[in-house]
Amino acid sequence: MRIPGLAAVMGLALIAGPAFAQDFGRLGGVSVDVRPLAAQGGGLQAEALRADLTAALRQAFGDRIVRGAPTLVVRVSGLSLNPYAGSQGASRGSFGGGGVTDYLDGEALLVGRDGAVLARHPQLSALPASSGGAWYDPASERRRVAALAEHYAAWLRRQLPAR
């Protein structure tokens, strides 16, 4: 009698297993949390990133948004815009080039209506610092932030499962 009972429990566990596994296929909405970045002194740049990343996530995941589903929250933990002054270090004979890279580090969280984190996906995006255009243009840094936000959202869309 123990064996059939164990088999029944195992069968139930196999059936219930996928129900507990969350995927990012249906979302109730998107949100961006830049508090960790702002706490590091990000200030205005953190708020600009929040606006850019929110818009990029809405664009990337718009077809997955349905009423009542868990929310996709991206918690940004790092933004690095490195100094860029044209083609630094890149030469025709160098392996791997040179240049400078910007980074956006964060974690995508699937958050239920009760506030519980149902799933998480860490992600780091990297783009050349030249993504903002000419280094001497005062708007270049702002465009670099926007480019990182779009890149992050696009890669997140590719990486998150939609069963």
Image (tube, rainbow, N blue to C red):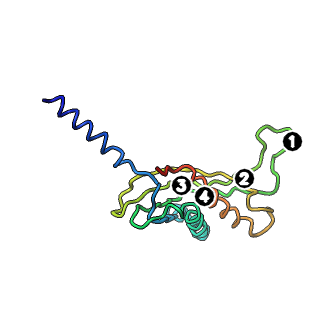
Marks 2 and 3 sit apart, C-alpha to C-alpha, by 18 Å
**Precedes in sequence: disc 1 or disc 4:** 4
Task: Give the amino acid at mark 3.
Answer: Gly
Front-most of residues 7 and 49: 7
Dot 1: few (<14), some (14–19), or many (≥20) neighbours within 10 Å?
few
Residue at 50% in and 59% down: 75
Residue 120 at x, y percent in the picture: 45, 51
Quadrant (top left/top right/bottom left/bottom right) for the N terminus: top left
Task: Give the amino acid at mark 2.
Answer: Pro
Marks 1, 4: nearer the viewer: 1
Marks 4 and 3 sit apart, C-alpha to C-alpha, by 9 Å
**Most distant residue in the left direction:** 1
Residue at 18% in and 31% down: 4
Residue of label 3 = 106
Residue 66 at x, y percent in the picture: 45, 65
Circle 2 — which element?
strand
Residue of label 2 = 128
Front-most of residues 155 and 26: 26
